[in-house]
Image: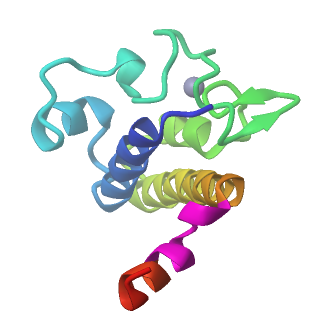
Amino acid sequence: MMDTDKLISFKKMWTWLSGYPAHDSQYYMQHVAKLDQPWLNGCPLATSDSDDCDGCRPLWYSKKGTLCSDVESPLYKWKATSPDYPDDRSYYASHIAVLAMNALREMQSDKFDASGKTAKSDYIDSLLHGR
Ligand SMILES: [Zn+2]
């Protein structure tokens, strides 16, 4: 099971990077998130400091590998694209952010399905009607 907070950090970073294609995750960790301790391999989901981690597996997994190692993945393409091509960098970064958003949405719906009583609509209903 994936850690929601890590996934949110991941999504935030890639959303930011899609707007600032000249920068990378090192810059983000230092100047935007202002982390005391940098993430392993510059990624909140990383499970190792090499590029074949499987922390990002829930976001992307194909026969060719994970988000880190699959040459077809937007993360791989982003890394392979120089900041001299800002439009491409923005495009790949926003694709990564969308993958994170979809994974978050899936996790949230799993949570609500698993415990019917705490489903969001019931909760709002109980606030409105004092039940
Ligand atoms: Zn990874």
User: Residue farthest to the bottom?
Assistant: 129
Residue visible at 41% across and 28% down in the picture: 43
Q: Quadrant of ligand 1?
A: top right
- Taking depth in this image into account, of 81 and 78 the one nearest to the observer is 78
Q: Let me know if residue 82 is in the magenta part.
A: no
What secondary structure do most residues of the magenta stretch adopt?
Answer: helix
Q: Which residues are magenta?
A: 116-123
Pinpoint residue 120: horizontal percent, then vertical percent. Answer: 52, 72
Name the residue located 65 percent from the left edge and 42 percent from the top edge. Answer: 59
Question: Residue 64: percent from the left, percent from the top?
Answer: 83, 28
Q: Nearer the viewer, residue 20 or 11?
A: 11
Residue 112: give x, y in percent of width and height: 62, 60
Residue 118 lies within the magenta run: yes
Residue 83, by quadrant, is top left
In the rendered image, residue 56, in percent from the top left (x then y), is placed at 60, 31
Q: Residue at x 40, y 47 (%)?
A: 8
- 103 relative position to 37: left or right: right
The residue nearer to you, when weighing 46 against 112, is 112
In the rendered image, which quarter contains the C terminus? bottom left
- Identified at 67% across, 24% down, the residue is 69
Asked if residue 48 is positioned above or below residue 56 in the image, the reply reads: above
53 in relation to 58, above or below: above
> Is 86 left, or right, of 80 in this rendering?
left
Asked if residue 56 is positioned above or below residue 50 in the image, the reply reads below
Residue most extreme to the top:
49
Q: Nearer the viewer, residue 70 or 3?
A: 3
What residue occupies the far front of the structure in this picture? 131
The vertical placement of 110 against 76, above or below, is below
